[in-house]
Image (cartoon, helix red, strand yellow):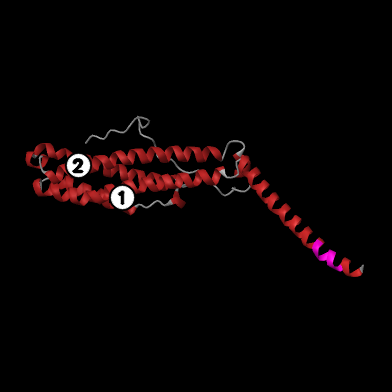
Amino acid sequence: MFGNSVTYEPRRTKMLNIIYRTRIVITIISLGLALSACGYNTIPTLEEQAKARWSDVQNQYQRRTDLIPNLVATVQGYAAQEKSVLTAVVEARAKATQIKVDASDLTDPAKLKAFQDAQNQLTGALGRLLAVRENYPDLKSNANFLALQSQLENTENGISVARRNYIDAVRAYNLSLRTFPTLLWAKTFFLGNKPMAEFAASEGSEKPPQVKF
C-alpha cells in the first residue's frame, strides 16, 4: 500500500505541473489577445509606420541630392556664364545635406522645419537652374540634360508622394495619442511617446503630384 502511494504522488505532482503550465500559457495568450483587442499595439504600430514613411521621404530627397552634381556639371558645360544660378544650387545642396533629421528627431517641430526650409530652398534653386535652358538651345536638346531632367522630375514626384504618405502616417499616430481607447495606453504604458511633427502640406497636396520647372 505504501509503495503504491509513493508511485502515485510523483505522477500527481507531474500532472499538476502540466495543468499549472497550461493555465499560464492560456493566461498569457488571453492577455495578449485582450491587449491587442483594446488597442495596446496600436500606438507602437502607428509609430513604426510613421518612421518608415519618414525613411521613404529621406530616400527620395537623397535621390535628388545625388542627381544634382551631374545636372550642375551638364548645365555648366553649356551655360558657364550662369554662375550665380549654378552657385546658388551648389550652396543650397550643401545646406540641405548638412541638416539631418533621424527618427528620434521627429517629435521636434523646429528640426523638421529647418529640414523642410532647406529642402524648399534647394527646390527653388533647382527651378531657376532648369529655367536657364530656355536661353540655350543646345542645352535643351542635350541627351544627358534631358535624361537628368526626367529623372529629377520623377524624383520630385516621388518626394511629393512620400511627404504626403508621411503626413498621413503622422496624423494617424498623433490621433492615437489623444483618442479613446488608445488614449488610455498613451497615458500609462506609452507616457513617454510624444506627437510627431508634420510637414506643412502644400496646397493641392491631396491631388496627384505634377512637377513643372
Residue 97 locus on image (x, y percent): 31, 52
Seen from the viewer's position, the closer of residues 94 and 152 is 152
Residue 177 locus on image (x, y percent): 56, 40
Secondary element at image label 2: helix
| Residue that mark 2 sits on | 149
Residue 132 locus on image (x, y percent): 14, 39
156 inside magenta stretch: no
Q: Main secondary structure of the magenta part?
A: helix
> Can you tell which quarter of the image residue 213 is in?
top left
Whether residue 164 appears in this view of the structure is: yes
Residue under the point 22% across and 49% down:
68
Residue 209's place in the image compared with 101, above or below, is above
Residue under the point 84% across and 64% down:
8
Label 1: how many Cα within 10 Å (few below 14, some 14–19, many 20+):
some
Q: Residue furthest right?
A: 1
The dot on residue 62 is 1
Q: Residue furthest left?
A: 138
Evaluate if marks 2 and 1 touch, with contact meaning CB atoms under 8 Å apart: no
Q: How far apart in space, not on screen, are marks 2 and 1 (Cα)?
A: 16 Å
In the drawing, does residue 74 fall left or right of residue 210? left
Residue under the point 67% across and 46% down:
30
Residue under the point 36% across and 32% down:
205
The magenta stretch is 6-11
Residue 205's place in the image compared with 151, above or below, is above
Seen from the viewer's position, the closer of residues 172 and 25 is 25
Q: Amino acid at mark 2?
A: Gln
Q: Amino acid at mark 1?
A: Gln
Residue 74's place in the image compared with 14, above or below, is above
Secondary element at image label 1: helix
In the drawing, does residue 65 fall left or right of residue 42? left
Residue 99 locus on image (x, y percent): 35, 52
Where does the N terminus fall, quadrant-wise? bottom right
